[in-house]
Image: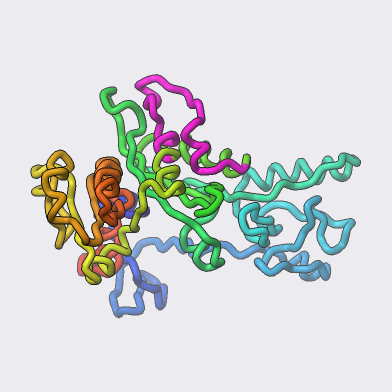
C-alpha cells in the first residue's frame, strides 16, 4: 500500500534508502550499517515515540503493558485521585481489547473533556479507541484506521483482505484520481477490522467513512448500502466505499474466492494456471510473468484449455476478474480471482524491488 507514496517521493527528488539502518550520526555525515556514508546539513530523527511518564513513575503510578500510564475508562490512574490523558496515557483498542499507545490529538482533547466531566460528577466513560491517522507528501495522502494486516497476523486475529483501486469521483468528470484501498474484515461475520488508503484525492473521506463504520460495528457488506453524497465532481454513483462493499461481499459470501498478490508465486509453482483476462493492448503494456492471455470476451471459447486445472484470473483491478471467476465457476472450474488485479500485484512487486534495492545514488 505504501508504494504509490514512495514513488511520489522519488519522483520529487527524495532518495530512499529502504531496509537500511543508521549506525552513527557524525558532524557532517550519516553512516549506515551497510557502510555507506551520506553527507547531511541536517539530520531529522523520526524514530518513534516513547511516553514521557517519568513523573508518573516517580509518583508510584502503574505503567501498563503498552508502556504508557495505566488508566481505567474514566482516565483514572492506579491512584484514583490522579488522572492521566494525552500521549502518555494508554488507550484500549476496540478491536483487540488490549492496551495500546495512540498518539492522536483528537483523543487527547476528548479525554481531557471526559476527565472534566468525571470530576464534575457526570457518569461518563471513555470509548475504546480505533486508531485513525493520515500523512501526506507532494499531494499524495496515506491513511489508516483500525487493524493493519501485520498487527492482525501478530495477534493471530482471523481476517480477510480485499484491495481495490476506484476513482476519487466519476471518471468522466475532469480530475478523477485513483484511490487505492485495502480493507480487513472478519472472515466469518464480515465485521470491519481496519483499512488503509493511498491516493491524490479523496483518501481522507473514505478512511473517515470506514472509521465511522468500524465504530458502529458495521460489516463489510454494509458498505454496499451506505448512502453517500454524490455529484460527479465529488464521487461516483457507486462510490469507492460502496465498491468496497460489493467486493467484500463477493469474498465473504464465497462468490468470488480470491488470492493475494504475495501468494501468487507459490501457487504458480504448484501448477496453478494464471490467466490474464485483460485486452491484448493492456497485456502488452505489462503482464505478470508466466501468465497466459485470454481476454474475458473470448473466455467462453477457451474453456477446454482450463478444464481440470487450478486457475487464477487477473485483470487490471479485479472487476473483470470477478466476471471471469463467475463464468469459470459455472463451468465447474476451480478458480480464484487475483485480489486487486495487476495493479495491486505491480504495487507489491515495485515495493519489494524498492526495499531490496541497494541505492548507489546516496
Please tell me in which quadrant of the rendered image residue 281 appears. top left
Does any portion of residue 9 appear in the rendered image?
no
Q: Quarter of the image holding residue 116?
A: top right
Q: How is the image coloured?
A: rainbow
In the rendered image of this protein, does residue 284 appear above or below residue 166?
A: below
What residue is at 26 percent from the left and 24 percent from the top?
172
Measuring 33% from the left and 42% from the top, which residue is drawn there? 165
The correct choice, above or below, for 242 with respect to 43 in the image is above
Residue at 25% x, 41% y: name it.
320
**Residue 293: percent from left, percent from top:** 12, 51
Q: Depth check: 104 or 233 in front?
A: 233
The image position of residue 219, as x and y in percent, is: 54, 43
Q: Judge by depth and name the residue closer to the eye, 301 or 62.
A: 301
Magenta span: chief secondary structure: loop
Is 11 contained in the magenta span? no
Disc tally is: 0
Left or right, residue 94 beside residue 158:
right
Q: Measuring 50% from the left and 26% from the top, which residue is drawn there?
A: 227
Q: Looking at the picture, how far across and down is residue 318, in whole percent?
A: 29, 45
Q: Nearer the viewer, residue 203 or 256?
A: 256
Please provide the residue range marked out in magenta. 217-244
Between residue 152 and residue 133, name the one nearer to us: 152
Q: Is residue 258 visible to the viewer in this orientation of the structure?
A: yes
Magenta run includes residue 241:
yes
Amino acid at each position: 500500500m505504501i508504494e504509490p507514496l514512495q514513488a511520489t517521493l522519488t519522483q520529487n527528488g527524495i532518495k530512499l534508502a529502504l531496509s537500511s539502518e543508521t549506525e552513527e550520526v557524525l558532524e557532517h555525515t550519516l553512516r549506515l550499517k551497510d557502510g555507506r556514508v551520506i553527507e547531511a546539513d541536517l539530520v531529522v530523527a523520526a524514530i518513534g515515540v516513547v511516553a514521557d511518564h517519568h513523573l508518573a513513575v516517580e509518583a508510584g503510578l502503574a505503567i501498563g503493558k503498552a508502556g504508557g500510564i495505566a488508566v481505567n475508562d474514566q482516565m483514572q490512574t492506579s491512584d484514583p485521585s490522579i488522572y492521566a490523558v494525552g500521549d502518555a496515557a494508554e488507550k484500549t483498542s476496540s478491536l483487540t481489547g488490549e492496551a495500546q499507545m495512540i498518539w492522536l490529538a483528537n483523543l487527547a482533547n476528548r479525554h481531557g473533556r471526559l476527565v472534566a466531566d468525571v470530576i464534575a460528577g457526570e457518569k461518563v466513560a471513555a470509548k475504546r479507541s480505533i486508531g485513525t491517522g493520515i500523512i501526506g507528501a507532494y499531494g499524495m495522502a496515506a491513511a489508516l484506521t483500525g487493524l493493519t494486516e501485520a498487527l492482525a497476523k501478530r495477534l493471530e486475529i482471523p481476517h480477510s483482505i480485499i484491495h481495490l483501486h476506484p476513482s476519487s469521483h466519476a471518471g468522466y468528470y475532469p480530475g478523477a484520481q485513483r484511490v487505492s484501498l485495502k480493507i480487513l474484515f472478519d472472515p466469518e461475520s464480515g465485521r470491519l477490522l481496519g483499512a488503509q488508503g493511498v491516493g491524490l484525492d479523496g483518501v481522507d473521506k473514505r478512511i473517515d467513512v470506514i472509521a465511522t463504520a468500524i465504530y458502529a460495528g458495521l460489516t463489510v457488506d454494509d458498505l454496499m448500502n451506505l448512502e453517500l453524497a454524490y455529484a460527479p465532481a465529488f464521487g461516483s454513483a457507486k462510490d469507492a466505499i460502496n465498491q468496497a462493499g460489493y467486493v467484500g461481499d463477493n469474498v465473504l459470501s464465497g462468490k468470488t474466492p480470491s488470492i493475494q498478490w504475495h501468494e501468487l508465486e507459490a501457487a504458480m509453482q504448484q501448477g496453478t494456471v494464471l490467466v490474464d483476462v485483460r485486452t491484448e493492448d493492456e497485456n502488452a503494456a505489462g503482464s505478470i510473468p508466466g501468465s497466459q492471455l485470454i481476454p474475458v470476451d473470448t473466455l467462453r471459447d477457451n474453456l477446454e484449455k482450463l478444464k481440470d486445472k487450478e486457475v487464477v484470473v487477473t485483470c487490471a483491478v479485479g472487476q473483470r476478474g470477478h466476471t471471469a471467476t463467475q463464468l469459470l465457476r459455472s463451468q465447474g472450474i476451480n478458480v480464484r480471482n487475483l485480489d486487486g488485479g495487476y495493479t495491486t500485484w505491480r504495487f507489491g512487486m515495485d515495493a519489494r524491488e524498492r526495499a531490496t534495492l541497494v541505492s548507489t545514488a546516496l
